[in-house]
Image (cartoon, rainbow, N blue to C red):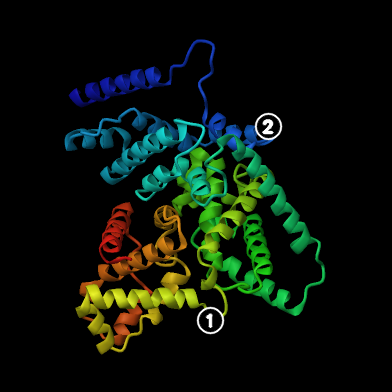
Amino acid sequence: KEQEINIKKMKAKTITKLDAKTKRKSGSKTPTIIDTIKPIHGLTKETEEKMVKALKENTFLRKYRNQVEDLNICDDTGQTEAHIKRMCGYYGIDINTYKEWMKQTQNIVQLKEIMNKKKTIDIKKIREGSFNGIPCLLRSYTWKLLLNYIPSAKIEKQEERLKQKRKDYYYLVKQYYQGKMEKNAEEETILHQIRIDVPRTSPDLPLFQNERIQKALERILYIWSIQHPGCGYVQGLNDLVTPFIVVFLSDYAAAARYDILNIGSFEEKEDIQETTLLLDEDIINKVEADAFWCFSLLLDHLQDHYTRSQPGIHRMVNQLEVIMERIDPKLYEHTKKTQLLFIQFAFRWMNCLLMRELSLKLSLRLFDALFAEASTVDFEQLHVFICVAFLRTWRNQLLKFDFADMVMFLQHLPTQHWTYHEIDMLLQQAFLLKSTFGK
């Protein structure tokens, strides 16, 4: 009975605080999640109605949104373990989930303060804050800032830039994909390989088994490859597009973003084929255009990774080997003794930026840190040190293995149970190593 009374009091207190927090000046309307994202994306009235309808019909997503709103008022940082356990019991969630939500909430407050102070965003502070992880609710907008897809100097020009870049992409689609009926042998080869790889992309995520999403992925890869004949199409590029599609699509289904990132959610909660909210043509077209340009900006940092002979990747693998020899001579000597070459396991780490070793959810967190690095040198160097820390994570196991066991282990690393805690520890170690041994 005492527990029931305490729960009722807590609920009443929470509702009171929430009402006080959301109360606006008389005559003004409390902004909804649709109002928040509508200006930057220019949603049509029809699309807005679909989003509102989908949000109302999906009780699971509405429940999640309410939980986040409640957590947003619990912003005292000095919470005791007893209080945390009590809140977990109240919401029916585990402690790690609660702590992650609290961290996301604090990051939202910090980044919003930076973004809302002036008409010009301090991109340096955004980069500093982004290394520690970008909240899901702000990730799409922040990635576009970090990659210089939208200007930070003139916020009022951002919507205009988005409209123009999307218009430019639609022109490229007509020019290279739809309008050019006859393709030469090289173009046919590229398109053939892309059509083989696209269905294999993120097979554990139902979103990428949808035909419209696969078509968007195919067009992005094909147009980029045709525009960059020195690189062409290389296997692994398809993996690098997926984070942009997921993040930008999540931005339009703001309440549903954890459903997209949690791989099994669509299978448990709803059929992706029937989710009209996520497959609206207006939304998909904008997501596809934004994903193409941001993917292109990412590859500007990795241009020589995908030219013939891929010198950029070999350079990073060599850097990994040199650093390992310096900071962990015992493990390095063991690889030499067993005749294991770094290129045999690290090539994929550099080619796909560890996306095949980590879940998509954790890859997004990794990309937050990578995008926070402004220059090409910093970007490359940080990723090399992330791979150093990643390799040393398995140090004790590797020292016990012979060549065959090491190859098998490194090709199937046991990261399936990793959480944000492990990825944060990895990034902290990488940052420390980069500060100590980097140029």
Residue closest to the far top: 26
Q: Position of residue 420 (x, y in %)?
A: 33, 52
Label 1: element kind: loop
Q: Quadrant of the N terminus?
A: top left
**Relative to 327, residue 272 above or below:** above
Q: Position of residue 266 (x, y in %)?
A: 50, 50
- In front: mark 2 or mark 1? 1
Residue 309 numbered mark, or none: 1
Local packing at callout 2 (Cα closer than 10 Å; few below 14, some 14-19, many 20+) is few
Local packing at callout 1 (Cα closer than 10 Å; few below 14, some 14-19, many 20+) is few
Label 2: element kind: helix
> Residue shown at 38%/78% (left/top)?
318
Q: Give, as a three-letter code, the residue at label 2.
A: Lys
User: Residue 156 lies in what quarter of the image?
Assistant: top right
User: Residue 341 lies in what quarter of the image?
Assistant: bottom left
Q: Taking 306 as reference, is 19 left or right? A: left
Q: Position of residue 404 (x, y in %)?
A: 32, 86
Is residue 269 at least partly visible in the picture?
Answer: no
User: Residue 225 lies in what quarter of the image?
Assistant: bottom right
Q: Position of residue 335 (x, y in %)?
A: 28, 83
Is residue 208 at least partly visible in the picture?
Answer: yes
Q: Give, as a three-letter code, the residue at label 1.
A: Ser
Marks 2 and 1, Cα distance to the nearest angstrom?
50 Å
> Residue shown at 26%/25% (left/top)?
7
Q: Disc 2 designates what residue? A: 45
Q: Taking 152 as reference, is 183 left or right? A: right
